[in-house]
Amino acid sequence: MKKLLLTGFEPFLSFPVNPTMQLVEKLDGTVIGDYKICGKILSVNFNASGEELLNYIEKETPDAVLSLGLAGGRYKMTPERVALNVKDGEPDNEGHQPMDETIELEGPPAYFSTLPIRKMVNRLSDAGLPAALSNSAGTYLCNNVMYAGLHWAAHHRPDMPSGFLHIPASFELAMQHGKIPGWSLDELLKGVTICIQTLSDEN
Ligand code: PCA
């Protein structure tokens, strides 16, 4: 059986819960398609999260990596197309706020996702779940982790599919926040499962 490293994030900024954390905890140890899921939670910390991901990859030696992030305010499930070599944005959970910085000094300006992102969007849509490709993972922690994974894979395991899926808020978070749309946790779970199944079918 193959192994998929599935990551989520802890709560951050104005989001007191992070549904990616709940989904990863639910899916850890389960099997989807050909993949046994190994779930891990990353910190919202510019100086640590990339390193955390790479440590998990080196320790768990997964066959594929899918990282999840909350995109509070988005209505759709959005596989990300590209990760930029940029750190910039709101403060992280340690209060660190980089501006216009590069993630990897010698790295390329960007990496494309190596996940079957178009097929994921099609399969999500066929299942009645709102979905679209996203052309920007932003320049905050999600982009940081996506870039770190793709940079590592480009140098060590170019055959290992790696990439990022942004998800909308859960009902629970939407109710607490008050200004963003939310999906039920079951529908979020269904969407993530479809994306992993699509990846399994492709490999
Ligand atoms: N979403 C943030 C960081 C953590 C998360 O779940 C982002 O989109 O960068």
Image (tube, rainbow, N blue to C red):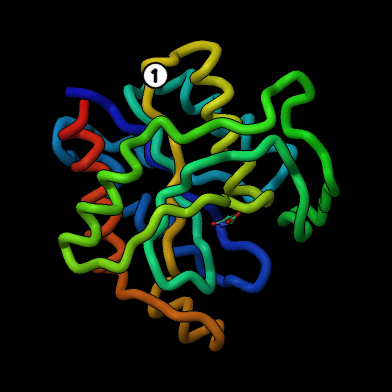
Position of 195 with respect to 33 (left or right) is right
Q: 152 or 176: nearer the eye?
A: 152
Specify few, some or many for label 1: CA neighbours under 10 Å numbering under 14, 14-19, or 20 or more: some
Residue 151 appears in view: yes
Position of 59 with respect to 103 (left or right) is left
Q: Which residue is mark 1?
A: 61
| Res 20 → quadrant | bottom left
Q: Amino acid at mark 1?
A: Thr
Q: 62 or 152: nearer the eye?
A: 152
Q: 94 or 159: nearer the eye?
A: 159
* Ligand 1 located in image quadrant: bottom right
Name above or below for residue 132 compared with residue 43: below
In the rendered image, residue 152, in percent from the top left (x then y), is placed at 55, 20
Q: 90 or 20: nearer the eye?
A: 90
Q: Residue at x 22, y 60 (%)?
A: 190
In the rendered image, residue 150, in percent from the top left (x then y), is placed at 52, 28
Disc 1 is placed on an element classified as loop
Q: Residue at x 72, y 43 (%)?
A: 46
Q: Residue at x 32, y 45 (%)?
A: 118
Residue 21 appears in view: no
Position of 198 with respect to 110 (left or right) is left
